Each structure stands twice: as C-alpha cells, then as structure tokens.
C-alpha cells in the first residue's frame, strides 16, 4: 500500500526545503524525499549570497532601491546573445517577490551581512548569510520538522506515478527498498541541476564538454529527467554557469562548516556577525573564496601557464572554454598553474588577485599559501617546487623553455617566466558550477507541457523550474530557489486535491 500525503517534494536542497516548509505552513501533510544521507544539495555547499532589492537591510544601510531598478540591472549581467534568450517576464515577477522571501528567511532566524555592491547592479543588493549557506539548510530543516513535515533521507525518486494526465505520486528507492508514495495535491520537483550529468551535458551543450564535471557530484539532473518523462517542456538546456577552472576541494572541513548554523549559538553568531567590522567579515568570506572561487583569467593573460601531471603544457591558457575542455582530457583531469617571482609579486596586492567575490573580498598568493596549503606550493627553485607536487622537474623545465622560446616567435606579448621563487597552484580542474536549463513553469510553479498546457499535479522549483530564466550574477540562484519554493508550497495547497 502506498503511503499518502498532500504534497511530496523531490529533493531537500534549498528549494525543496522551502517548498516543504510552506506547504506544511498551509496545513499540508508533507513528505520530502532526499537521495543523499543528509539534506543540503548544492545549496549546502554554496557561498550563500542572496540578491534582492527593497530589503530591510538595504533600508537600514540607507540604500534606496526597488525591484523595478533591479529588473533593469539584471539584464546587464549576461552577454547579449544569452540575455536575448532570457525569460524577462518571469524574471521581473521573481525579482518583485525576492525581498519578501528574504524577510521570511530573516524572520526564521537567519542572519545576513550586507548589502554589498556587485556592478552592474547600480545599488548594493547582495546579502550574505552567516556563517555560510549551510545555515539555510539548518534553519529550513528545523522549521519544516517543527511544522510536522516528514523528511526521508537515502530516498531516491526514480519515477512519477500517473493517473491519466495527472501526476499522483512517486516511486522511490528508500534504503534499497522500492516504495510508492501518493500525493493528493501535487509533487514538487526540487532535485537541483545537471552539472554532473555527462550525457545531458553532451546532448545539450556538445560532446566536447562530456568529460567536464559538476562541482556537486550529485547534481545529476534527476528532476529534469522526471519532468521530461511527464511531458514537460525543458528550455535553455545548453546554457551553463561555467565551465571554469577551480581548485579541487580541500579534504578538510571548511572553516565555516565548524560554525553553528542553528539554535541559540547560531543566533548569537548572527547577531555578532552583523556588528563585526568589515575587515573581519572580509576575512571570513575570504576563507570561502579560496574554497571554490575560480582563479581569474587575468593570471593567464599575464603569463601564468598550465602544466599537466606530466609537467607538459597542453593548451593556450587564454582560450576559454578550450582551456577547460583540454584540461578535462588530461591525465586525472587535473593541472597546475605555474607562477614565477614576477607573478607572485604582482598577484600579492590590489588590483591583481587570484580570486574574488567582487567588491567583497579578494584572495592573493599569500592568502592561498595560508588558507589552502593543500593547493599552494612555493619554493625558491623550479626543481624543488615541481618535486613538491610530484611533477617531473626535467619535464617542467623543458616545458618552460619551449614556452619562453616560443613567445617572440609567435609575436606573443606575454612576458616569459624566468626567475624564482616559484609557486604551483593546484590541482585545478574544469568544473561546471551549475546549469541554467529547466522546465517551463507558470507563476504558481506548475509545470507546463510543450503545448503550454498545465501538467496537473506537477510543480518544479529551484534549478528544476527555472522557466527560461538565466540567473547570472551572484545571489540570484539561491534567491530563486527560496522564492520558487515558497510560492510552490503555497500554490500546491491551494489546488484542489486529486483524491478526497
Ligand atoms: C560552489 C558553489 C557556490 C554557489 N554559491 C552561490 C551563492 O552564493 N549564491 C547563489 O545564489 N547561488 C550560488 N550557487 C548556486 C546555488 O547554490 C544553486 O543553484 C541553488 O542553491 C540550487 O538550489 P536547488 O534547491 O535547486 O538545488 P539543490 O540545493 O542542489 O537541491 C537539490 C536536492 O535534490 C536532491 N535530489 C536530486 N535528485 C534526487 C532524487 N532523484 N530523489 C531525491 N532527491 C534528489 C539532491 O541530493 C539535493 O539535495 C553556488 C553553486 C556552487 C556550486
């Protein structure tokens, strides 16, 4: 016998927990199914920025802003060809709703710092949750459970159950057993993106991208597959955030994850954080930067080179995305960035930084040496630095010689790499951060079929229900995950149930 709920949510990341919270808030019997042992998804490993206009924190900071201004600015982030494909009506609707979502999150105990500027936004609109994005998950999970919703981990949804056109439940594998769950009001897809689904990436973006991985290894596009099987129209499936070079994650738990994310300790931390001087906040955020932010392209324009595991160059480092495609084809899919003494000095102070969260914090060579010793190796001479990361020093010397000799021959304006000390940064890999394709949904987050009709009983939120929006800039993906979850949770409970 299938167990019956009003609402079933597929995925316990940011959007799924928000949807479950709001459906339970409306009095619904809610089941949230999560395939991993813990909730969190990509939301849980994010930096945590939330961008919105017209917020209480903006008013406190004396920033006079509105969703209407935000709508004008949001179109200036993506390049024109991408922006031409953006769903601007839906984006305007979302940006009008974002501040309400933000105030709800503050109301359930989350603390934010900011607003911080991020041009081309004309006003500071980026708010950062403290101590990090895990706080969203902790607060929502607690709220959801207090409202009586059921959260089942290790529960992978594999199929939607249908009754005619209507979606009436799911089939899931829970702790190795196949089970069915019925939903009288609706099923909400909140299963995240497909950055690590190689077949989807190859099919929609191109075969040459197949070997590039997603930062979140569990972002496998299950929700997109389920939506498609139900007849949903998926759009912008070829649009991705990345690929970009990023350092492999540290095996140590990042500093932020040691900080309390819920309970009294988290509230105290939140209250303290908002009063901390800017330099302290910057140093906290810097720790997040060196975990996931990508090394700037300027490094390569200035002459840094990439070496593979055999100490060989394999691409013109300035060519993007060829650089990422070539990197993914190297042994172990890894490479190291080589800097000489000139570059080390140059990338030690503003305006030359290795990575940044724009206008908030900047990480230089010394920050990497201190905060990411696992991916930063320094030595006085080339042979020594090569040995430290296990590269064949003779091969490294040969690669360098060939590179330096070739610069004048090719009329290349980059300066040769000549004198120590030397730094090797890496391993670095090519990663997709997230994907921008998703189901078309209406303003109640109901999934639409190719002919524009509603698929009864099916909703999609977060990266599953992007509705044609391409949310480039920092802080809009989380704002959408939380906003779409909130709206879906309310909407699904306002629909008539399929079985009384
Ligand atoms: C390193 C990094 C930093 C980022 N920083 C920011 C930031 O600061 N601000 C911002 O706005 N955006 C940021 N993003 C993007 C943003 O975090 C995500 O786009 C957003 O949080 C996605 O939320 P979601 O709910 O759609 O998906 P997720 O949070 O990924 O949740 C999906 C959940 O569904 C589960 N699931 C998947 N398939 C199934 C299945 N078949 N059955 C059951 N459960 C399933 C997953 O395990 C997961 O828990 C960042 C992304 C990365 C990778």
Image (tube, rainbow, N blue to C red):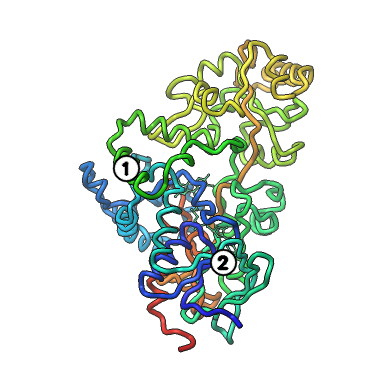
Whichever of labels 2 and 1 marks the residue nearer the N terminus, that label is: 2
**Which of 240/371 is in front?**
371
**Which of 57/416 is in front?**
57
**Neighbours of disc 1 within 10 Å: few (<14), some (14-19), many (20+):** few
Q: CA distance from mark 2 to mark 1?
A: 43 Å
* Residue at horizontal 63 percent and vertical 70 percent from the top: 172
Q: Position of residue 393 (x, y in %)?
A: 76, 18
Does 101 sit above or below residue 110? below
* Residue at horizontal 56 percent and vertical 72 percent from the top: 232
Does 242 sit above or below residue 295? below
Q: Which residue is mark 2?
A: 234
Which quarter of the figure is the N terminus placed in?
A: bottom right
- Residue 439 appearing in the image: no
Q: Which mark is residue 268?
A: 1
Image quarter for residue 218?
A: bottom right
- Residue 346 appearing in the image: yes
Q: Position of residue 17 (x, y in %)?
A: 46, 61
Does 193 sit above or below residue 497? above
**Neighbours of disc 2 within 10 Å: few (<14), some (14-19), many (20+):** many
């Amino acid at each position: 016998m299938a167990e019956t709920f009003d609402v079933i949510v597929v995925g316990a990341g940011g959007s799924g927990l928000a949807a479950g919270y709001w459906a339970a808030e409306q009095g619904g019997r809610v089941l949230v199914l999560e395939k991993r042992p813990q909730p969190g998804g990509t939301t849980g490993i994010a930096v945590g920025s939330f961008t919105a206009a017209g917020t209480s924190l903006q008013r406190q900071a004396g920033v006079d802003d509105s969703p209407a201004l935000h709508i004008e600015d949001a179109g200036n982030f993506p390049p024109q060809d991408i922006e031409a494909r953006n769903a601007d009506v839906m984006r305007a609707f979302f940006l009008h709703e974002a501040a309400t979502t933000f105030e709800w999150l503050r109301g359930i105990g989350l603390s934010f710092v900011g607003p911080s500027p991020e041009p081309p936004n004309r006003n500071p609109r980026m708010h950062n949750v403290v101590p990090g994005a895990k706080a969203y998950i902790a607060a929502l999970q607690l709220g959801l459970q207090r409202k009586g919703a059921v959260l089942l981990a290790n529960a992978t949804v594999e199929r939607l159950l249908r009754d005619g056109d209507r979606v009436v439940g799911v089939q899931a594998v829970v702790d190795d057993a196949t089970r069915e769950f019925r939903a009288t009001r609706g099923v909400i897809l909140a299963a995240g993106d497909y950055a690590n689904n190689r077949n989807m990436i190859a099919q929609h973006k191109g075969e040459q991208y197949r070997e590039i991985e997603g930062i979140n290894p569990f972002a496998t596009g299950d929700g997109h597959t389920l939506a498609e099987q139900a007849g949903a129209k998926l759009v912008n499936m070829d649009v991705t955030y990345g690929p970009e070079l990023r350092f492999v994650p540290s095996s140590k738990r990042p500093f932020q994850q040691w900080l309390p994310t819920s309970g009294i300790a988290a509230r105290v931390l939140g209250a303290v954080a908002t009063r901390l001087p800017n330099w302290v906040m910057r140093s906290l955020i810097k720790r997040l930067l060196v975990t996931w932010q990508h090394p700037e392209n300027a490094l390569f324009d200035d002459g840094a080179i990439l070496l593979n595991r055999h100490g060989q160059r394999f691409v013109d480092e300035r060519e993007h995305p060829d650089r990422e495609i070539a990197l993914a084809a190297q042994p172990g899919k890894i490479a190291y960035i080589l800097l000489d003494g000139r570059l080390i000095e140059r990338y030690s102070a503003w305006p030359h930084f290795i990575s940044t969260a724009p206008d908030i914090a900047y990480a230089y060579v010394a920050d990497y040496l201190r905060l990411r010793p696992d991916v930063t190796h320094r030595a006085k001479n080339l042979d020594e630095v090569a040995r430290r990361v296990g590269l064949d020093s003779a091969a490294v010397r040969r690669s360098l010689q060939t590179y330096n000799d070739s610069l004048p021959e090719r009329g290349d304006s980059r300066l040769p790499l000549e004198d120590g000390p030397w730094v090797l940064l890496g391993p670095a890999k090519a990663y997709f951060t997230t994907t921008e394709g998703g189901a078309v949904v209406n303003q109640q987050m109901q999934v639409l079929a190719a002919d524009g009709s509603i698929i009864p009983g099916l909703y999609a939120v977060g990266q599953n229900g992007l509705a044609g929006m391409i949310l480039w800039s920092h802080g809009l993906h989380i704002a959408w995950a939380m906003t779409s979850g909130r709206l879906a949770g309310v909407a699904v409970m306002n629909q008539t149930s399929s079985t009384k």
